Image (cartoon, rainbow, N blue to C red):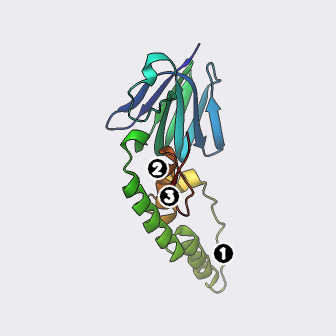
């Protein structure tokens, strides 16, 4: 018996149908939901969601491939699993069939340049810790460790986050190799 799967954004329902499985990345790592999965609630990281469709529903969806797999770049959100249903709630998600590959490549290049120029959080964190340590007579505050999922939600304009979003878009359409992002993956 398949599971029911839905991918919902504020603008629309991107997928609603029966699925053999759903794969995505949460803040705890990559996870696969099979039919009758135990109840689960989690934060979704920037990643590609893959939904293996069943039956006639596999035809014609914007993110569907000939293999019956719906793919979308998801830019964070939440997943809820209960009663043989997987519900994905995302503020932004893009079905593979709607992704402009050239625009995604340009976004990847711009994000790579910003990260290389030290504009990403790695550079800022270093500057902030140096400033905190420079206060004479005071202890440096304990550092809060952010998961990549939390960082994506709290700092959506961070170049590191933009880089991960661009990589997810290209992965959703089958373009591999973030450094060059040139060769389509074979299906």
Question: Foreground residue, 65 or 161?
Answer: 65
Q: Are marks 1 and 2 in contact (CB under 8 Å)?
A: no
Q: In the picture, which quadrant includes the N terminus?
A: top right
The quarter of the rendered structure image containing the C terminus is top right
Q: Position of residue 41 (x, y in %)?
A: 58, 33
Q: Distance of mark 1 from mark 2, alpha carbons? A: 39 Å
Where 31 sits versus 58, above or below? below
Percent coordinates x, y for residue 92 in the rendering: 40, 45
Badge 2 is on which residue? 169
Q: Nearer the observer, disc 1 or disc 3?
A: 3
Nearest to N terminus: mark 2 or mark 3: 2
Q: Percent from the top left, x then y, of residue 143?
A: 64, 66
Which residue is tagged 3? 182
* Residue beneath disc 1: 140
Front position in the image: 127 or 44: 44
Q: Secondary structure at mark 1?
A: loop
């Amino acid at each position: 018996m398949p599971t029911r799967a839905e991918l919902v954004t504020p603008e629309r329902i991107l997928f609603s149908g029966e699925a053999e499985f759903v794969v995505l990345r949460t803040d705890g790592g990559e996870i696969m939901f099979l039919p009758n999965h135990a109840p689960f609630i989690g934060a979704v990281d920037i990643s590609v969601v893959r939904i293996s469709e069943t039956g006639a529903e596999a035809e014609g969806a914007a993110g569907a491939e000939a293999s019956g797999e719906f793919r979308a770049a998801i830019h964070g959100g939440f997943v809820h699993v209960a009663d043989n249903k997987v519900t994905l709630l995302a503020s932004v998600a893009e079905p593979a069939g709607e992704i402009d590959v050239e625009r995604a490549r340009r976004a990847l290049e711009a994000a790579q340049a910003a990260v290389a120029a030290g504009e990403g959080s790695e550079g800022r964190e270093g500057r902030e810790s140096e400033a905190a340590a420079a206060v004479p007579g005071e202890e440096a505050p304990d550092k809060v460790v952010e998961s990549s999922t939390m960082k994506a939600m709290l700092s959506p304009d961070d170049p590191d986050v933009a880089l991960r979003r661009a990589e997810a878009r290209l992965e959703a359409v089958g373009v591999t190799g973030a450094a060059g992002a040139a060769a389509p993956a074979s299906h």
